[in-house]
């Protein structure tokens, strides 16, 4: 019984009945803001938007006794209804194409359309992962060319391309570390993670079978080198450091951290989520990093797509390269020929590979997009991109630090994201309220309550693809919202007021989960 | 650079506001000895659209596109016709360039779509609850195994020989780093999948039995029989499906005793793309298990005005809340691929999916009958949906390579899937979908006849 279908808005219910409009309409629509029912309320199992031959139900079959007997109850829509349904839904989404998306640590930059065009070339889009190698030379060429760029940009030795997303890349890096330690018969148990780390870091280390210990941050928002050194020892497999870190600061002591970890027999994982800040300006390999994932969907502009697919190649140091997962490509230095290494030919040449993390070859559709982006920028353009990203963030930091508390604002320049706290907000007004107020002003909120080390954190990452005019408008909106938050403006506490929905009841969603549509009783 | 809006005048004004002399000065926390003063040497400079497109097109032309061959490859990645509407919808910027819907007030488009997607997957699989998708079928399979271990508190993982070898390989890799251990025997290419063999190995220590439906050789296992045997020992049945179109013709695994149903959703709405991005589907039949489920979940609720709306929910299972105690480290789903799946599934509906499945099966039967007439070729399967195994008198890998030069991608050789040999190297997995024509089937049969004839003559 789906009780919420009864309590929610339904077609034909005047909006006045739900109490949110001065000018009610009978449809619930408000001009271009159109309510849309679920496909299960719109379609029928007999409607179809694809022309297919009528099945011959008497034809002999080879399904044995397993032919489907029970109905699926899957509704269909005609093509025009389908196009309209999803077009209406799309208009209830915010997107980079609509405006600034300043989510810290997420690098929501413009997604170039050339990337999309290239990914759809038949030679990339319409190729099977298990075709004979002679028929996929171009695919291997893309992997090799992108690998070369990633290795050069990071100053590392090798790259594992198959991880499907950032967290999958983290897992790849940690498993390389574990395999390397096991190969030298050194079963260490602990991975150290700064308390400001992304939640995926400790989750990944635990998933890979490690005990996780937090290391504290110093007063300047950076890893406390002395505390870290004090904890190092023969039981520590490695550290997971984010650089630039989640406070938007460059870890000045990174090389010293790496050296200390190496001296203690451990290895260094760097979370590359924030690589966009330093691309073309600092190479993690020069700082002693052993493994780092790269989010192609952040730094290299492949689309986030409403929550994926991502792509998380992992660059590896010389120490970890022999343990990279299957499959991978190698290039013959002499002939320039590219080879695909899989289970069948891994044996002699690469005995250390820790195995396979995913079917097939990884996110090829993202490789083509990322390579297109990289070639468009070139080495000079990538360096300019990181520079502009950092410039934009510092510009916002200095446009707002007189009205919002910037906990590390006095410490110098930030990297590609600016961090603020809720210090000074009136009692009863929170970071969440300010963020929801941003929605009414036409902006996507910033990352909130992260990193955990700052109270009511607001982490703002504008990226390099925003103009000064947009940043100025955003700063104007933020200044106004900061004043309202400090004054305790109650209308902020119920924002947003102009979005397709008011605040959603997340507690109810979790208490009584309704995770699939069910036909209301009696219908 | 066409993607960078700032002009030098802007940059100057902004630096002035910041109080820094140059962009380089903003990086003064980077130790000087590690700071690069200019673009990395040896890498090319920026290039315009035309030049980049030309370069990428040249690379793409080095691949043989499926459309340019008589194409019969499957084994976990399938070529189906994707309606033009699907690609149009997923290229709408509001879907393409949106983030994970953590701000539900301005993400109802993505959220409602995910709620619809979850419902479609649950119904397709015969499950109660499906999640908002995972990376792909192989990783979804491992996550299901981990979930089963949490539920049963046991660590013996029985994987049928019929499971895709890459999926097995992923599980074996991951199990090395956990208390679980995988037991797996390579498949024997018989007419039937050997359900009794796996049933005989289930014991009181078994956490889960993992069975693929249809299996990697195209055969259809008796799920209900295996489910009953597993449940008798307190083990869970995980069913893997790599070809969701098959479920338009075959009974849903959830209706046959499966506890967890996972699979690859690529067949519906998502192109081949050399193996990724794809989307993992994940459903459970017992709703009480929901809090042990991995991955994002979208749920229905109401907003402050009482209107129906959707949110990501039960996130207390997830890494950003639970950190090292999370059910998985997963921080993403395959959102855009889930959208493609959902749009295609909406266009099909039950009627269309059944018709699509029937057309696949009709053509596959026709192909099997035709290929069985080729001297030296034996069709092994008693049962199949749209792919089946041929056994030849000769190794099939060189044959497949050779036929590719003649414009026939004949299928996936079992030697590629199972490098260990033991007779499998003479096997060929042939997949037939609605994209194949009678001419394609004839081209494959003729090419096989000629190749086998030439082999005999030599």
Image (cartoon, coloured by chain):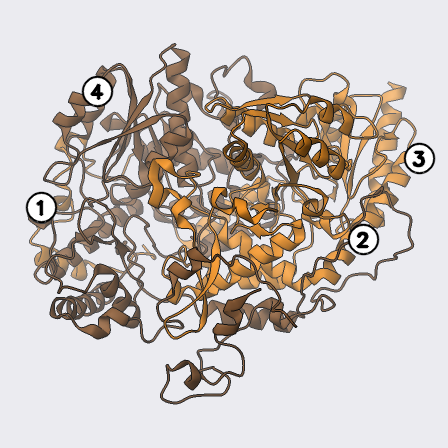
Chain colours: A brown, B orange
Q: Residues within 10 Å of mark 2 (few under 14, many from 20)?
A: many
- Mark-to-mark CA distance, 2 and 4: 62 Å
**Label 3 sits on residue:** B373
Q: In the rendered view, would you say A317 is above or below B15?
A: above
Coordinates of residue A19 in the picture (x, y in percent):
38, 82
Q: Which residue corresponds to mark 1?
A: A412
**Parent chain of label 4:** A
Residue visible at 23% across and 49% down in the picture? A416
Residue corresponding to mark 4: A232
Q: Residue B456, how many percent across, how many down?
A: 89, 20
Q: Is residue A150 left or right of residue A334?
A: left
- Chain of the residue where label 2 is placed in the rendered structure: B
**Real-space CA distance between mark 1 and mark 2, rounded to the nearest whole angstrom:** 67 Å
Query: Both on one chain, marks 1 and 2?
Result: no
Q: Residue furthest bottom?
A: A23
Image coords of residue A262 (percent x, y): 25, 18
Q: Do the CB atoms of the residues marked 1 and 4 lie less than 8 Å apart?
A: no
Image quadrant assignment for residue A458: bottom left
Report if the CB atoms under discs 4 and 3 are less than 8 Å apart.
Answer: no
């Amino acid at each position: 019984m789906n009780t919420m279908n009864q309590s929610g808005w339904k077609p034909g219910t005047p909006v006045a009945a739900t109490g949110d409009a001065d000018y009610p309409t009978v449809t619930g629509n408000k001009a271009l803001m159109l309510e849309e029912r679920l496909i299960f309320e719109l379609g029928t199992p007999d409607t179809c938007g694809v022309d297919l031959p009528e099945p011959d139900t008497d034809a002999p079959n080879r399904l044995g006794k397993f032919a489907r007997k029970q109905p699926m109850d899957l509704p269909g829509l005609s093509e025009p209804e389908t196009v309209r349904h999803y077009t209406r839904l799309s208009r209830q989404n915010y997107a980079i194409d609509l405006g600034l998306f300043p989510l810290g640590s997420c690098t929501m930059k413009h997604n170039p359309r050339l990337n999309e065009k290239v990914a759809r070339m038949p030679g990339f889009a319409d190729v099977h992962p298990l075709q004979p190698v002679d028929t996929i030379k171009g695919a291997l060429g893309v992997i090799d060319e992108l690998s070369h760029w990633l290795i050069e940009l990071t100053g590392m030795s090798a790259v594992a391309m198959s991880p499907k997303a950032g967290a999958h890349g983290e897992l790849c890096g940690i498993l390389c570390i574990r395999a390397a330690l096991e190969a030298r018969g050194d079963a260490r148990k602990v991975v150290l993670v700064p308390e400001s780390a992304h939640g995926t870091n400790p989750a990944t280390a635990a998933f890979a079978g490690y005990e996780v210990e937090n290391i504290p941050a110093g007063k300047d928002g950076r890893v406390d080198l002395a505390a870290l050194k004090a904890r190092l020892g023969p039981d520590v497999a490695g550290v997971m450091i984010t650089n630039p870190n989640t406070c938007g600061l460059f870890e000045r002591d990174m090389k010293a951290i790496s050296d200390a970890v190496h001296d203690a027999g451990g290895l260094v994982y760097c979370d590359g989520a924030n690589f966009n800040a330093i691309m073309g300006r600092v190479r993690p390999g020069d700082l002693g990093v052993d493994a780092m994932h790269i989010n192609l969907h952040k730094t290299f502009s492949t689309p986030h797509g409403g929550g994926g697919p991502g792509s998380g190649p992992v660059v590896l140091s010389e120490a970890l390269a022999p343990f990279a997962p299957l499959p991978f490509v190698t290039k013959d230095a002499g002939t320039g020929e590219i080879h695909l290494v899989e289970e069948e030919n891994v044996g002699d040449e690469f005995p250390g590979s820790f195995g396979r993390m995913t079917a097939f070859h990884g996110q090829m559709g993202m490789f083509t997009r990322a390579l297109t982006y990289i070639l468009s920028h070139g080495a000079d353009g990538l360096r300019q991109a990181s520079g502009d990203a950092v410039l934009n963030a510092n510009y916002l930091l200095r446009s707002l630090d007189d009205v919002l508390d910037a906990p590390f604002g006095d410490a110098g320049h930030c990297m590609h994201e600016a961090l603020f706290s809720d210090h000074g907000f009136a009692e009863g007004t929170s970071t969440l309220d300010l963020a929801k107020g941003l929605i009414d002003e036409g902006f996507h909120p910033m990352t909130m309550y992260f990193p955990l080390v700052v109270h009511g954190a607001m982490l703002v990452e504008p990226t390099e693809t925003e103009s000064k005019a947009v940043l100025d408008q955003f700063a104007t909106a933020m200044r106004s919202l900061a004043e309202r938050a400090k004054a305790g403006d109650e209308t902020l506490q119920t924002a947003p007021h102009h979005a397709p929905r008011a605040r959603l009841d997340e507690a109810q969603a979790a208490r009584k989960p309704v995770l699939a549509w069910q036909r209301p009783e009696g219908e | 650079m066409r993607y960078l809006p700032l002009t030098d005048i802007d940059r100057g004004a902004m630096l002035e506001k910041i109080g820094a002399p140059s962009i380089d000065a903003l990086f003064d926390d980077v130790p000087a000895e590690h700071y690069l003063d200019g673009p990395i040497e040896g890498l090319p400079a920026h290039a315009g659209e035309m030049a980049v497109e030309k370069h990428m097109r040249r690379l793409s032309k080095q691949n043989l596109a499926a459309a340019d061959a008589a194409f019969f490859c499957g084994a976990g990645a399938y070529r189906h016709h994707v309606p033009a509407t699907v690609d149009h919808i997923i290229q709408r910027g509001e879907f393409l360039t949106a983030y994970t819907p953590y701000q539900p007030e301005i993400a109802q488009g993505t959220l409602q779509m995910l709620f619809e997607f979850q419902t479609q997957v649950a119904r397709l699989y015969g499950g109660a609850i499906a999640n908002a998708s995972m990376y792909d079928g192989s990783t979804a399979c491992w996550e299901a195994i981990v979930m089963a271990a949490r539920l049963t508190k046991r660590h013996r993982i029985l994987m049928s020989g019929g499971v895709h070898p890459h999926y097995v390989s992923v599980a074996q890799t991951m199990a090395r780093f956990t208390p679980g251990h995988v037991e797996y025997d390579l498949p024997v290419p018989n007419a039937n999948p050997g359900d009794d063999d796996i049933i005989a190995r289930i014991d009181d220590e078994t956490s889960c039995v993992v069975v693929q439906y249809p299996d990697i050789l195209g055969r259809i296992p008796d799920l209900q029989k295996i489910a009953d045997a597993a449940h008798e020992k307190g083990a869970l049945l995980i069913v893997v499906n790599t070809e969701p179109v098959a479920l338009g013709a075959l009974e849903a695994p959830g209706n046959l005793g499966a506890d967890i149903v996972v699979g690859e959703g690529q067949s519906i709405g998502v192109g081949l793309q050399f193996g990724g991005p794809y989307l993992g589907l994940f459903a459970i039949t017992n709703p009480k298990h929901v809090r042990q489920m991995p991955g994002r979940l979208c749920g229905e609720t109401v907003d402050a005005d009482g209107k129906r709306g959707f949110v990501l929910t039960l996130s207390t299972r997830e890494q950003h809340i639970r950190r090292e105690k999370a059910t998985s480290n997963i921080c993403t789903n395959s959102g855009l691929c889930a959208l493609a799946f959902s749009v295609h599934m909406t266009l099909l509906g039950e009627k269309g999916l059944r018709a699509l499945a029937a057309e696949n099966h009709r053509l596959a039967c026709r192909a099997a009958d035709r290929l069985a007439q080729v001297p030296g070729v034996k069709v092994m399967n008693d049962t199949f949906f749209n792919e089946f195994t041929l056994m030849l008198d000769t190794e099939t890998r060189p044959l497949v390579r050779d036929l590719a030069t003649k414009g026939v991608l004949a299928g996936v050789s079992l030697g590629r899937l199972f490098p260990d040999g033991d007779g499998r190297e003479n096997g060929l997995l042939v997949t037939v979908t609605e994209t194949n024509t009678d001419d394609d089937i004839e081209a494959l049969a003729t090419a096989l006849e000629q190749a086998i004839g030439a082999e005999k003559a030599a």
